[in-house]
Image (tube, rainbow, N blue to C red):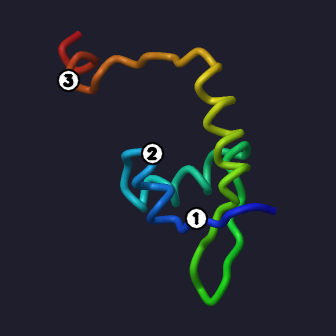
Amino acid sequence: MGTKITRRQRARDEGVSVRTIERRQETDPTYPKSEIINGRHYFDADECAEYDQMRASTPQIRRASPSARASK
């Protein structure tokens, strides 16, 4: 295991809120697992980098915005 980063640092790196990171941990089985130390979540930086690389190489499915879906 390499360098540890906090959930807050992970959120900042992804440009999302801490709650979004929590949701991804709950719903995405491929999301890096965190280690809880003294009640705080820590991620392995190397695992996060691998996940980011895998996610960047996967085609993204675009969904219509809620307002676009409502106008149909």
Find numbered disc 1 in the image and state the secondary structure of the residue it sits on: strand
Task: Quickly name the residue at label 1.
Answer: 5
Q: Residues within 10 Å of mark 1 (few under 14, many from 20)?
A: some
Q: Residue at x 63, y 69 (%)?
A: 42
Residue 28 x, y percent position in the rendering? 65, 45
What mark, if any, has residue 67 been given in the picture? 3
Find numbered disc 3 in the image and state the secondary structure of the residue it sits on: helix
Nearer to me, 23 or 68: 23
Residue 56 x, y percent position in the rendering? 59, 25
What mark, if any, has residue 13 been given in the picture? none
Please name which of the two marks, 3 or 1, marks the residue nearer to the observer: 1
Quadrant placement of the C terminus: top left
Which of marks 2 and 1 precedes in the sequence? Answer: 1
What mark, if any, has residue 14 been given in the picture? 2
**Above or below — where is 37 with respect to 46?**
below
Which of marks 1 and 3 precedes in the sequence? Answer: 1
The amino acid type found where label 1 is placed reads Ile
- Residue 38 figure quarter: bottom right
Quadrant placement of the N terminus: bottom right
Residue 16 x, y percent position in the rendering? 38, 49
Q: Residues within 10 Å of mark 2 (few under 14, many from 20)?
A: few
Which of marks 2 and 3 precedes in the sequence? Answer: 2
Find numbered disc 2 in the image and state the secondary structure of the residue it sits on: helix
How far apart are labels 3 and 1 at the CA level? 37 Å
How far apart are labels 1 and 2 at the CA level? 13 Å
Q: Residue at x 54, y 68 (%)?
A: 6
**In the image: residue 46, left or right of residue 7:** right
**Above or below — where is 58 with respect to 7?**
above
**In the image: residue 72, left or right of residue 61:** left
